[in-house]
Every structure is written in C-alpha cells, then in structure tokens.
Image: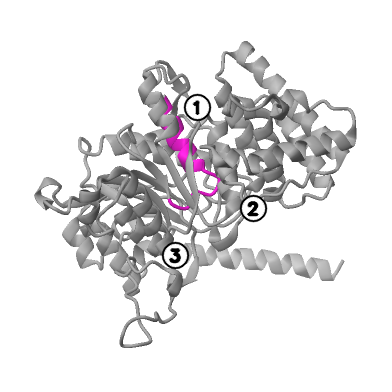
Amino acid sequence: MLSKEIQNKVQNLWDRLWSAGFANPISAIEQISYLLFMKRLENFNSSVDDKYKWSNYSKLKNDKELVDRIKNVFQFIKTELSKEDEPFAQAMSNASFDLDNPNLLRNAIEFIDSIYEDIESEIEDKNQHFHDIQGDVYEHLLKHTSEAGKNGQFRTPRHIIHMMAGLLDPDLDGKILDLASGTGGFLVGAYQYLITKYSKSVEPDDDGLIKGTDGGKLNKSQRKKLEEETFYGFDIDRTMVRIGVMNLMMHGISKPHIVYLDSLSTAYEKWEADQLSVTLDSKDKKSLVNPKLQGQFKYILANPPFTGKIDSPGVSENLDRIYPPVYEDKEETKRKKQTVQSELLFLERMVYMLEEGGRAAVIVPEGVLFNSGKAHKRIREILMTDCNLDGVISMPSGVFQPYTGVKTSILIFTKRKWKNGSDNPQNTEVWFYGMDSDGYTLDSNRKRLKESPLPKVLEHWNNKKQENQSDRKLIHFSIPYEEIKDNGFELNFNLYKDFVYEPQEFEPSEKILKKISELELEINQGLEELRNF
C-alpha cells in the first residue's frame, strides 16, 4: 500500500499535466512513462553512456538546454537503444515527446525525483522491496486511465486479476499470455502470483489473498527465466503496448514480450511462424502441424474486449469454426464481408494458442454463456470438446462499475491432447460457482467491504474434489456434461441453480381488506379536515 505522501505527489503530478493541457489520461501517462524510463535508464541498461544518464541532465538550470538534452535522450532511446534488446525502446517507433514546456518539464522532473526519494525511504522504514513500491506507483498512475476504451475495453479490477491468477495457478513451466494485454495488468498479476508462490514469507493482502514479495525460493536460473522469458502480450494500440511494457518493467520484469499485433489477424500466424523458426531446425519446420494445434502458451489470462464487432476480411482464415468464411467468387480468393463478434473469436484463438494441457482463465460477458445464436453455441461446444471446461464462475453485475454494469463470468479451461485423447479424457462434469459480491460495493463508488469473499472462492475451487458438488442449492455445484449438452451447451449459472424460496405467511385476506378500509377512512377524514381548515 502506497503512503499517502506518495499518492499525493502522484496526484499533484497528474494535476500539473492536466492543467497544462494533457486532458487525455492515456497521453499524460505516456509522457510520464518516458520520463520514468529516462530516470531508470541506467538501471535498465547499465552500459548506457554518461550523457544519457538522468543525473547528468535532470538538474540543468537553463530551460532551453534542459529541453534539448531531454529530447536528445528521447531520440537516443527511440533510435539507437531500440536496435538493442530493449523492450520499451523497441515499442517507441511512432512515439513523440510532447513535454516541451520548460516549467512543466522541470515540475515533472522534481515530482519524479521526490517520489523516488520517498520510495527509498519506505524501503528502509518498512522493509519493502523496491519493485513492489515502484510498481505500486505505476499502478496508481494507471488508475487515471480506468475509463472505457475502444471496443468495450475496461481495466480489470486488481483483486479480480489476483483471484484469477489463483484459479489458474501458473508455474515456471511455460509462457504466460494475455492476447489483448492493454496496460499489462493480467501479466503483472501472474508475475506477482509466481513471486508469492516462491516466497519464503507471505501474508494476506487487503482482499484477504495471500501475497509474498521476496521470491526467496527462486534460484538464479528460475528468476532469470521468470523475468526474461515468461510474459507475452499482444495489443492493437501502440500507446498501450508502451504503457504495458513500462508497467511490467516497473514491477521487475526486465524483458516483457508485448507486441504491437492484432491477435485475431494473420499477423499472429506470421509472428508465431517467426518464433518457431528460431526454435525448430529445418527438418522440424517442414513437418509443422496445423497452426490450430500448434499452441505455444502454457497459460492464458485475459479479459478481451466486449461487444467488439469487426469485419471478417481482417480476421485470420484459421479462425473459421464459429464464423465459416463466405467468399464472393468460386475460386475462394475474395472473402465476403461479415460482421463478427470479437469476444467469440478471441475464445477460438485462445484454444489454438494453448499448448496441449495448457490452461486459460478468461472473463466473458454473460451473453457468451447463454446466447442461442449459432456462433455462440459453437464456441461453447468447442470449449467443451477441444478443451476440458473446468469451471464457470458467475460474477455479480457491477464488478466493472462505474464504467459498465455488464454482468460477466470467468471461464477456466484446459486444452485436451489431440494426438491421444485418452491421455486427457473429456470432463464428465463442469464446476459452477456463483459470486454475489467481489468484496466491494457494486455501485459507482466501489467501496471496500469489511470481508472479502475471494479467499472463499479459491478455497472452494481448490477443494472441489473433496466437497459435495451435487447440491444445487449451494453456491457451488457440478453439472454433468450430458446435461449441459442437452441444454445447447448453455453455461448460465442460474439455469442450473436450485433457488430456494422461503415461504411467507400472510394474514387472512378479510383482515387485510379490513385494514385497507380503515386506512382509507383515516385518509378521507384527514383530507376533509384539510378542506375545512
């Protein structure tokens, strides 16, 4: 938890940029990110020349010299440093530095220096880890971007991300992906979960979820793999790619792999082929399996955009099972335009991205679970045949307030083995859980409640094989696969829940009518008195 002093300084920095004309929160945090990277450049890249080090130019007295030097540093990062294996610099191809007002620039530098002084003090006073506090500072900055984006994107609440990481339970045995990564919150959450999993000391956080910060059980090789080879993301917005990379780096992930790429387009197949060409020899390349089967991610955590309607010509031809392509010519060279829903395509893409035995936890709008359209039914069938659908967790309306009241659920699924299905047999049932709260009020204020239900969700999830799952009156139960199939693969929690209605006793109707008559007489007498007053 950040100190009030640091929070106030972050807010003051925002206020200065706002009053200077940076009314768009995304633009403001982008400019702040550039300064933060400059501040930490020598830590990210120890071999950088002295003239590019923050300490050699940040306190220059001459306004023009200060602006010119910082612009030179920015240009160095954008051009020379991007040629090296530097993630943030590589994401800056179309970036521009717009803090050219000397007074504003100097104010921003002073605030950033002051914030880092406070970080150092908190490390000494509270025995906290640098990257935890630095990451919290950036998370606090990102709160200002928590407004609706394009195509129904919303920042997922941090406590929901942490719960989902617990449901997925990733380990150090593979790559972790968010295919619509935005600010990188899910990847940060997965990283923090793994640090906790390998920490020597842990304690509950504000939401009752276990948190550790030391990662003391990790050896040098494991830590290097975690920080440099584990976290991947894609986004169609270059600005969000930069913000996402910075978020991960501020939390201690030295080499995040976040790519400017539309994961629903053929650009993903090209990227995947390039990745495989590095790891496979020429003999293996010739015998690559169908890209639908060639997943390379062990874990996926995501909240892809809701209500995103896109035109099919831009969609990869490998995504053809829920929206079969329609062509304008017999030769099938020109694809006819179809309007398709991106949240369904994202689910299909995830199935192909996962390696066999890989797991995903994803947030979907409630309509995905019960809509009777062909595409919706087909994606649910795919999730229950190509994969084992392990769980459906129904969240209450209001989790994404104040930006939308849309009701959502979490799907957890495991990709089945294709070559030998008997190695990974199909589930005979699906586990359901109904959350009536996420630990916060479900109005626009979203105030924390006294007790968080999230630890209970994880407890029931982890003990589902030992607990009674046949009583549908409970908040958790299991439903046979065949019953779900007979219901058109509907996955709506309320469809299968047995609701118990408490009988209420009422007075005899004659007595109620008598009371109404007496009340009516009393009202009429009162009205008469008013008229005669």
Between residue 36 and residue 86, name the one nearer to us. Answer: 86
* Stretch in magenta: 179-195
Instruction: Please name the amino acid that badge 2 sits on.
Output: Asn
The mark nearer the N terminus, 3 or 2, is 2
Instruction: Please name the amino acid that badge 3 sits on.
Output: Ser
Q: Quadrant of residue 221?
A: top left
Could you tell me how far apart the alpha carbons at marks 1 and 3 are, in whole angstroms?
A: 35 Å
Label 3 residue SS:
helix
Q: Which residue is mark 3?
A: 342
- Give the foreground label among 1 and 2: 2
* Rendered image: mark on residue 205: 1
Q: At x 27% / y 47%, what residue is drawn?
A: 355
Between residue 93 and residue 131, name the one nearer to us. Answer: 93
* Rendered image: mark on residue 94: 2
Could you tell me how far apart the alpha carbons at marks 3 and 2 are, in whole angstroms?
A: 27 Å
Q: Position of residue 413 (x, y in %)?
A: 29, 49
* Rendered image: mark on residue 25: none
Label 1 residue SS:
loop
Instruction: Please name the amino acid that badge 1 sits on.
Output: Asp
Q: Position of residue 207 (x, y in %)?
A: 49, 32
The mark nearer the N terminus, 1 or 2, is 2
The mark nearer the N terminus, 1 or 3, is 1
User: For mark 3, does the 10 Å Cα neighbourhood hold few (<14), some (14 to 19), or many (20 or more) residues?
Assistant: many
- Residue 288 visible in image: no
Relative side of 75 to 360, left or right? right
- Give the foreground label among 3 and 2: 2
Query: Vertical placement of 96 versus 215: above or below?
Result: below
Q: Quadrant of residue 386?
A: bottom left
Q: Position of residue 24 (x, y in %)?
A: 72, 52
In the picture, the quarter occupied by the N terminus is top right
